[in-house]
Image: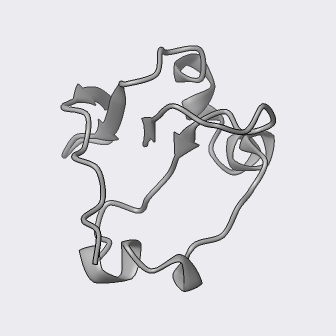
Amino acid sequence: MYREQSGNPVDSGWRFFAGDDIQEVADDPAYLEIYDVNTVANYDPEIIPYLDKPIGTAWARNAVGEWEEEDFPAPPSSH
């Protein structure tokens, strides 16, 4: 999960991915869905402590399932 700047006041800027996503699929808006961050937190309450983290941060689960900060992802390539 990572948080980017949003141009929409109702968008938290959080982006959530499974971790095994194929870049070509992640770049195609037809495969993406928009959810309220509360909905995502209901599925995985362990994200809640990270939701106040600043724009430009990224987090992922490590091999034992613990959250670790990661490098902020590069912006999607334009086609």
Q: Which quadrant of the structure image shows residue 42?
A: top right
Q: Which quadrant of the structure image shows residue 62?
A: top left
- Viewer-side residue, 49 vs 14: 14
- Viewer-side residue, 29 vs 38: 29
Residue ID at (22%, 46%): 74
Measured as percent of width and height from the top left, residue 52 is found at 59, 14
Q: Is residue 14 above or below residue 75?
A: above
Q: Is residue 49 above or below residue 33?
A: above
Residue ID at (44%, 80%): 28
Measured as percent of width and height from the top left, residue 40 is found at 69, 48
Q: Quadrant of the C terminus?
A: bottom left
The residue sitting at the front extreme is 79
Residue ID at (26%, 74%): 23
Q: Quadrant of the N terminus?
A: top left
* Colouring rule applied to residues: one colour
Q: Is residue 4 above or below residue 21?
A: above
- Viewer-side residue, 43 vs 14: 14
Measured as percent of width and height from the top left, residue 60 is found at 32, 40
Measured as percent of width and height from the top left, residue 11 is found at 71, 39
Question: In the visual, does 59 lie left or right of 39?
Answer: left
Residue ID at (57%, 17%): 49
Question: In the visual, does 79 lie left or right of 8?
Answer: left
Question: In the visual, does 8 lie left or right of 15?
Answer: right
